[in-house]
Structure formats: C-alpha cells, structure tokens
Image (cartoon, helix red, strand yellow):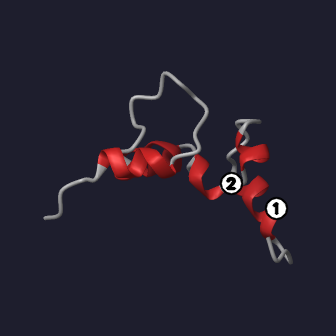
C-alpha cells in the first residue's frame, strides 16, 4: 500500500476550515464529506469553497455546461 503524502497534499489543499483534522489526508476527507453527500474543498474554486457549501448540488451548478 502507498504511504499517504500528507505534507504534499496539504500544499494543494484549499480548505479554509482551520481546525480540520483531515487536512492532507485525502482518503479520510473524502469519506467524511461523502457521508453528508458533499465533496471536499479541493473540488471547488476558492471563492466557492469559502462559503462552505460543498454540496453535490452546488458542484453540479458550478460545473454544469461550464469550461471552468
């Protein structure tokens, strides 16, 4: 099994929720958000991520028909 590259992952993480214990641990982050039918911050543009609306509906609305 591959080792998690936590520090490298943190460099690319745009999550603004500072007390998050899952930063850089992508597999835990994805499981956590998916339980609530959400997606992790890294799949959203920075301006949307700051709203903390990480719902599937918001993701679809942003990217539907978009070249973003």
Left or right: 30 as drawn, with respect to 15: left
In whole angstroms, how far apart are the C-alphas of marks 1 and 2?
Answer: 9 Å
Q: Which residue is mark 2?
A: 44
Which residue is rendered at x = 56% and y = 43% of the image? 36
Circles 1, 2 touching at the beta carbon (< 8 Å): yes
> What residue did someone put label 1 on?
62
> Eyeballing the image, is 62 above or below 68?
above
Q: Which mark is residue 54?
A: none
Viewer can see residue 33: yes
Tell me where residue 37 appears, x and y as whole percent: 59, 50
Q: Give the residue displayed 79% in from the left and 44% down from the top.
A: 47
15 relative position to 53: left or right: left
**Dot 1: what SS?**
helix
Task: List x then y, in percent, for residue 54.
Answer: 68, 46
Question: Dot 1, how many residues are within 10 Å of its Cα: few (below 14), some (14-19), or many (20+)?
Answer: some
Disc 2 crowd, CA 10 A, few/some/many (<14, 14-19, 20+): many
Query: Residue 55 or 41: which is nearer the viewer?
Result: 41
Q: Is residue 37 visible?
A: no
Of helix, strand and loop, which one carries label 2?
loop
Residue at 45% x, 51% y: name it.
30
Q: Earlier in the sequence, mark 1 or mark 2?
A: 2
Image quadrant assignment for residue 67: bottom right
Picture coordinates of residue 68, whole percent (x, y): 79, 70
Q: In this view, which residue lies farthest toward the left?
A: 1
**How many numbered discs sit on the rendered protein?**
2
Q: Position of residue 1 (x, y in %)?
A: 13, 64
What residue is rendered at 52% in x and 45% in y? 33
Residue in the foreground of this view, choosing between 29 and 46? 46
């Amino acid at each position: 099994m591959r080792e998690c590259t936590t520090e490298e992952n943190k460099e690319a993480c745009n999550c603004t929720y500072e007390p998050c214990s899952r930063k850089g641990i992508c597999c835990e982050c994805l499981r956590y958000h998916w339980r609530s039918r959400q997606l992790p911050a890294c799949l959203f543009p920075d301006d949307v991520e700051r709203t903390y609306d990480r719902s599937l509906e918001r993701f679809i609305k942003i990217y539907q028909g978009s070249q973003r």
